[in-house]
Amino acid sequence: MGIMSYFLVMLVAVVLLESEVSGKTVKGLFKSEVARQQNGQFITKFMYQGRSGLLVCRLDNSALATEKESRLLLYQDLDSGLDNLSCSERLAKASVSISLSQDEQNQTIPRQSSPTGWQIFYSDRYTCQEGSAVPSHADLTFTVLLFNADSAGNPLEHFSAEEAGLHSFYFLLLLAYFIACCIYIQPLYQALRKGGPMHTVLKVLTTALTLQGCSALCNYVHLARYSRDGTGIPLMGSLAEFWDMVSQVSMLYMLLSLCMGWTLSRGRKPQSRPLQWEQSPASTAIAVGGVITQGVLLLWEQYSDLESEHHSYHAQQSLAGLLLIALRVGLALLLASILYQIISTERSTLKRDFYLTFAKGCFLWFLCHPVLVLISVIFNDHQREKVVTIGVILCQSISMVILYQLFLSRSLYWEVSSLSSVSLPLTMSRTNHRGRY
């Protein structure tokens, strides 16, 4: 586990050092030079629900903004081909132009029939004057607040349309985790104390599930604060991403180690204990290689497009996201090949059932993301990320439950392992076992 520990330390360092503030209360500086270089300074993007949208811009020096003829430009079509237009054509194509001449400027967003994404840019009188020098004015300090309508129809909701509902989802997820913890914590603790043939697997499963719960808690705290101020707690958001990443790589390491280690050692000695954690240089190399590859792709996906304010492991627009999907499909095919060889040569019905259940848990873990990405195509733009994010979390949680039930099952695992019931986790009374078996 030494390589795994070093890798996880590297992950936490990268995630925490590269954390970005992503919120819909946006603070910064309007810069004339940047606006000239980019034909309009990009500020942020936001998806309005279609009704009662509001943009509020606050300035610290409205007199300077008036002198510079400062404006905010709102573009409704995110794929409108702005890069192919000249500077003047680009500014003229804005759906809404807001003149900044007051300390606080409020702008109602035109009503749309469905949720629509908007890009917001800054420009002033110097943006398209390429031949003249920009006067050495001070930059304008601004605060931009973006609101959607809440349940009462008032523009007080900071969440963009594609984020709406995630706060409630994480609350329900935490509630489910809490109830399950209250029910199963004692028998699971007893199983871990007893040790047994699946002790390492149970520890990794428990660790991965705990990290997933920590990620959900951090996301809930971040979004709870975000709902009030539009900024949230960026550090909590970064921690949520980190815990989710560690949970992902832990599960991958466990699944690859179980399948590859047991398969590679199968020909050298009889296996009365299926899918035990069998360490070998080859199996360790394959498992660590898969973990490192997935970790690198997760980091690349997360930070491949900082300007888009992307902070979700379940989006698939980037090259890194597509490679991550391809990796998961490839690993699922690899495990399918291994398990098919095992099942096809296994004569015991109980052992085949054991392997088939294990295969279900593995395939659900690896294939839920690619399948949900394909399914999300039929949904609207503002629903796709939520469908993938919520679906992946739920499917991976179900996968963990399936594996827990498999490895903690008294009757099935006792019969396929040929072990004494004394060493089994979560056994019933020893007297009953001795009398029965």
Image (cartoon, rainbow, N blue to C red):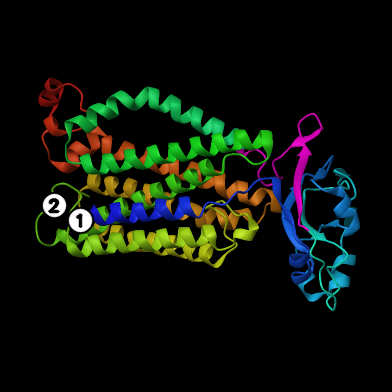
Question: Pointer 1 and pointer 2: residues touching (CB < 8 Å)?
Answer: yes
Q: Which residue is mark 1?
A: 262
Can residue 4 be spotted in the picture? yes
183 relative position to 237: left or right: left
Residue 277, percent across and down?
20, 50
Between the residue at mark 1 and the residue at mark 2, the CA separation in whole angstroms equals 8 Å
Image label count: 2
- Residue 426 lies in quadrant: top left
User: What amino acid type should be assigned to the residue bearing mark 1?
Assistant: Trp
Residue 5 location (% of width, % of height): 29, 51
Q: Report x, y in % for residue 292.
A: 36, 61
Labelled disc at residue 151: none
165 magenta-colored: yes
* Residue 314 image position (x, y, % from top left): 54, 53
**For residue 50: magenta?**
no
Image height of 282 relative to 382, above or below: below
Q: Residue extending furthest front? A: 136
- Which SS class for mark 1? helix
Label 2 sits on a secondary structure element that is: loop
User: Could you tell me the amino acid type at mark 2?
Assistant: Gln
- In-front residue for pair 22/78: 22
Residue farthest to the bottom, as pictured: 131
Q: Circle 2 is placed at which residue position?
A: 271
Q: Is residue 186 left or right of residue 154?
A: left
The quadrant of the image that shows the C terminus is top left
Seen from the viewer's position, the closer of residues 129 and 16 is: 129
Residue at (28, 25) in percent of width and height? 187
Observer able to see residue 403: no
Residue displayed at 75% across by 46% down: 143
- Residue 64, relative to residue 401: is it above or below? below
Residue 7 image-quadrant placement: bottom left
- Segment tinted magenta in the rendering: 138-166
